[in-house]
Image: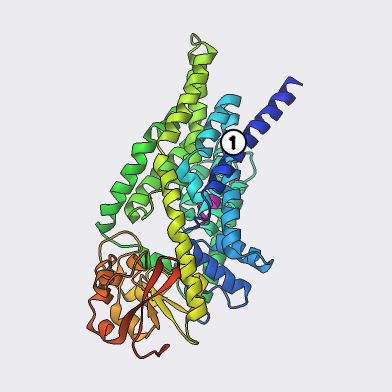
Amino acid sequence: MATYGKTWAFVLAVAALCAAAAAIMISFGDIVQDDAFISYRYARNLAEGHGLVYNPGERVEGYSDFLWTVAIAAAVKTGVAAEVAGRWLGMACALAAVAATAILARRWGGFWLGLVAAAMLALNANFLVEGAQGLETALFVLVVTLGAARAAKEYVDPTCRPLSALFLILAMLTRVDGALVWLVVLPFYLSTARANPKRFVVWAATFLAATAGFEVWRLAYYGAPFPNTFYAKVALGLDPLRTGFPYTGTFLLRFTPVLLFIPLAARRRREFYVWGALALVFLVYVTAVGGDIKSTDRFYLPIVPLALIALAAAAADISAAVTWAPRWTKALVGVALVGTHVLGFVPGFQFAKDYRYPHDLHVAAGKWLAANAPPGATLATSAAGIIPYYSGLPTIDILGLTDRHVAREGRRTATLPGHGLSDAEYVLSRKPTYILIYEAVLEPYVPSEEAVLSAAHWPAARELAASPRFHEEYVFSHAEIMPGEYFLYFIRADGGTGP
């Protein structure tokens, strides 16, 4: 009965943490990220019968979250708007990750440390922001956590069935770098092959068959071995390190104390060898690709629950060794761990507060285009998400994420990942009706044309602003989309709507 009661107390405590996390994410309001709307546009087109495409008739894999996009498409098919499905599904996955962290941390750290680990995730503002922003991040965190935990169990116990392969397949389908998780687990699994060779064959064959099948479909449907986003974002050489090192440094500044618990936990438990290797590989990989434009640790969040679980395990060892300390001091340490962890993510709460206002304006701008654009109109912009989604216009992504030509043939300038490509002549040859200089697309006043063009920050926009042809063929205009809020755009001088 005592065990039964303690289990229910734990369930109720985890439910309370999830409720708190849900309340915080809901309080952020509608802060779905612009990039999420790229996937939503693919999902909507799929649900409406146009195929898994950004622009109907153009097969370009401009997303890197296949499973997430298909899941959103399924929701759209039932009548739920993509942006609504993405927001709520993202929050649900975030809450599931909190619950999974609690359960796994309790397994190794006990009742109270399980709750401490879960609380540290449930109150991590960066994690909550990503859960609320409608991207695949929370789903990826969830499947990586479950997959790594199961793979570690299978590593230390060769009699366990190879169920981790299923989670690792989901990780690979959710995000391209999910394949890294399988590659990290592979040598550990291989070390157990002699003890159970049949299990290793089933585990490896299952993952490789799923990966090969997906790759065959990708080649047949899109005609390329990698997503278009790979060609647009990945740069060779040392340039990505210019942004990768600061991105990783910022993460480590906040999270090194927690990461150090992985080797401490591994001293008594071989399972954590797998997690330590995974953390190291992610640190190297994310640094090498240049990090991310966002400050929310998006690419590092998959290793955060694992580190928190390791913290619970190592803290349990330390607590057992420190027999002289009264129980209340241990509780105080747990509260201090949660409190100091939360303080490190205060900027994340500010990020959420600042994001909602421009989001609403971009929605209004997209709806204005949908209502006012002439038949056959097209759009060119460096932000291929919210405005193109709500406008419904065929869109040229001048950064190349959803455009095959720019991704492969565009000139590359050293800058943040995904923002360094440009080809102004190609964009102008497509004769879009509207061109947006996204860095100055919404203002509370009507600036001069020179001021808008001077605000161009990314190479693609700067190249357009410097093009004589652009100045010959386009005129600056604006529309008041809300009281005192202006949508700024360039429209073809001849009134044309395409080639």
Identify the image quadrant of residue 101: top right
Per the rendered image, the range of residues in magenta is: 135-141
Q: Quadrant of the C terminus?
A: bottom left
Q: Position of residue 125 (x, y in %)?
A: 47, 42
Q: Residue at x 35, y 78 (%)?
A: 477
User: Label 1 neighbourhood size at 10 Å, few (<14), some (14-19), many (20+)?
Assistant: many
Residue 154 shows in this picture: no
Q: Position of residue 65 (x, y in %)?
A: 51, 61
> At numbered mark 1, what does the secondary structure look like: helix, strand or loop?
helix
260 inside magenta stretch: no
Residue 306 shows in this picture: yes
Q: Residue furthest front?
A: 483
Is 162 displayed left or right of 391 in the figure? right
Is 477 displayed left or right of 465 in the figure? right
* Along the line of sight, the residue nearer the viewer: 478 or 320: 478
Q: Quadrant of the N terminus?
A: top right
Q: Residue at x 43, y 88 (%)?
A: 497
Q: Does 144 appear above or below 492?
A: above
Q: Residue furthest right?
A: 1
Residue type highlighted by circle 1: Leu
Identify the image quadrant of residue 253: top left
Q: Residue beneath label 1, please?
A: 17
Is 13 displayed left or right of 372 in the figure? right
* Along the line of sight, the residue nearer the viewer: 298 or 347: 347
Identify the image quadrant of residue 78: bottom right
Q: Does 189 appear above or below 377?
A: above
Q: Position of residue 298 (x, y in %)?
A: 43, 50
Q: Residue furthest top?
A: 324
Instruction: Give the total number of marks visible in the rendering.
Output: 1
Magenta stretch secondary structure, dominant: helix
